[in-house]
Amino acid sequence: MHFLDVAVIGVYFALIAYIGYRTGRGNQGIEDYFLARRAMPWYVIGLSVMATQASAITLIGTTGQAYVDGMRFIQLYFGLPLAMVILSATLVPFFYRARVYTAYEFLEKRFDGKTRSLTSFLFLLGRGLADAVVIYAPSVILAIVFGLDEKTLILAIGAGATLYTALGGMRAVMWVEAWQMAIIFLGIMFCLGVVVVGLPADVSLAQAVQIAGAAGRTETVDFSLDPSVTYTFWSGVVGGIFLMLSYFGCDQSQVQRYLTGRSLAESRVSLLFNALLKIPMQFVILLTGALLFVFYQFEKPPPIFNPVALERLRTSEYGAEFSTIEREYEQAFEKRKESASGLARALSTAEEPEARRLFLEADARVSEARGRVAALVEKNEGAPFNDTNYVFPTFVLTQLPPGAVGLILVAIFAAAMSTVESELTALSSATVVDFYRRYVKAHGSESHYLLVSRGATLFWGAFATLCALTMGRLGSAIEAVNRIGSYFYGPILGVFILAVGTKRANGHGAFVGVLAGVAFVQLAARMTDVSFLYYNLIGTAAAVVVGYGISLVFPLVRKGPYNEA
Amino acid sequence: MSEGADPPPPIFGTWRRFYAVVVANTLLVYLLLLLFSRFAR
């Protein structure tokens, strides 16, 4: 790695350590440590919320997704702005009035202890391992593409984020995240600029977008009504609203952020800020990927983007077969390059239809050769192969000048660490507030809880980092648990709807409703082929219907300030 | 919580108007993306 890149990375780590130290001093209790004394301005909360959601895989994978499959992925976010409006008008004021530390604490005020403990436990179960995946996934990709040591990367991301989160608490984390989000923005815009500048001089940006469009990479709205198609306008709006309501309304890593607002208005504005910026930001990331596809029409990409798997294939028993395909791939690429130039010249002329036909034929030949190489890699590795996440890092390594590579690596680190530190603060707050203070020591001093909170943060950070270090061996088991964790969000949203939207729902109903919701989502996942975007809708509906029904059959009389919703 | 205690940014006047702006902006974004999808192919 060039010393300029190392210097940029060094400056980044020094900067976040400095910001973390400056802003995280003077924590005196858990309201300081977990909620930044409820004194944060809206723009820091808004950037922190966005940084939490934008993991490294969002940055790396989304560009690769647009390169391989086009920009249809943007529809995943269609429900987000509407979900932000709904949350600002409904759940956020309830959380505020209740003066809670965790989203689940509110459920005890409204229902009972067992509902609070169950939902908080499900959160810990789902997020504890997800944090390990957030550390592991980018580390393994960066290690392969940049030839760095995987364990060093895991330790830099995991231990780095854990250290300043444990010491500085929420205020340090949120200020660091605001800066990290700025770095991510800068990195994305820089890459978009490099891709555009890297296009041939005779291909304008408008022509590049049309070439991407000709290859189906610019489809951003699909009105298909087929529920098995993952990304459509309808799955994005309907399924997406429930997905985003579940995530932003019930996941402690997000709720904790807007609980830090110095007023209810600041918290609401931070969510609405996110509502306005999220889709445009995703559009820029996806457009970068789609234009990367055009860039690689004129600059020969490797047949597959995973250099380690490619090298293993070259030296394997399939090496000779690969060499033959590689020659065909090179010929197909030259043909496609010629036809892409031809299409750029023919746009808006009478020759355009014929130029499009030639380009699509050439592109299909390149894709076919690439598919045959991927099939050989699968045979050689004995496992399914997908190089979507390797496209963007390969571009960065091979096309960017020294220093700029460091900047993009820093943006990827920032995206990974911002998600990790948010999860750590959320996991430790749920552990301490929902379990330790609830069941172990109810009347400790503030300094005692602060010490325990720091310990819980260190514990979860060490747990996530160690799981990430061993994930190569645990692999599919952790992925399975992680996937199951994502099934909990819809049912938990259902419980919150019962809590704030009904008067008759009670603790027994809410508790059974969560379990029923999880069961329905499992059934939907196993027995149907509906898009995963609808799982939260199914889980929410099941939890509300079953929870409300049980509450009517087994009514409870319980008085409290939040029963009168 | 009443609007008086937690007013929205002055430019919007009321929370309802702020929400309406966000929803309208979202619809506009859908429309722009639809146009992008249709014309960039």
Image (spheres, rainbow, N blue to C red):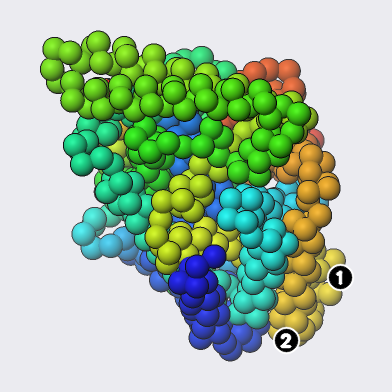
**Residue at horizontal 51%, vertical 21%?**
A328
Specify whether B33 is left or right of A394.
left
Above or below, A90 relative to A167: above
**Residue at horizontal 72%, vertical 86%?**
A447
Residues under labels 1 and 2: Cα distance?
16 Å
**Residue at horizontal 41%, vertical 51%?**
A399
Q: Are marks 1 and 2 in contact (CB under 8 Å)?
A: no
Q: Amino acid at mark 1?
A: Val
Above or below, A212 relative to A228: below
| Visible residue check, residue A421 | yes
Q: Amino acid at mark 2?
A: Ser
**Residue at horizontal 75%, vertical 41%?**
A479
Above or below, A128 relative to A497: below
Residue sitting at the far bottom: A26
> Along the line of sight, which residue is nearer the eye, A86 or A564?
A86
Judging from the image, mark 2 belongs to the subunit labelled A
Specify whether A492 is left or right of A371.
right
Other residues around mark 1 within 10 Å, as few (<14) / some (14–19) / many (≥20): few
Q: Which mark is residue A428?
A: none
> Along the line of sight, which residue is nearer the eye, A185 or B19?
A185
Judging from the image, mark 1 belongs to the subunit labelled A
Specify whether A430 is left or right of A93.
right
Query: Secondary structure beneath disc 1?
Result: helix
Q: Position of residue A323 (x, y in %)?
A: 60, 27
Q: Which residue is tagged 1?
A: A440
Q: Position of residue A322 (x, y in %)?
A: 63, 27
Query: Secondary structure beneath disc 2?
Result: helix
Above or below, A208 relative to A48: above
Q: Earlier in the sequence, mark 1 or mark 2?
A: 1
Q: Position of residue A181 (x, y in %)?
A: 44, 62
Residue sitting at the far left: A349
Q: Which residue is tagged 2?
A: A447
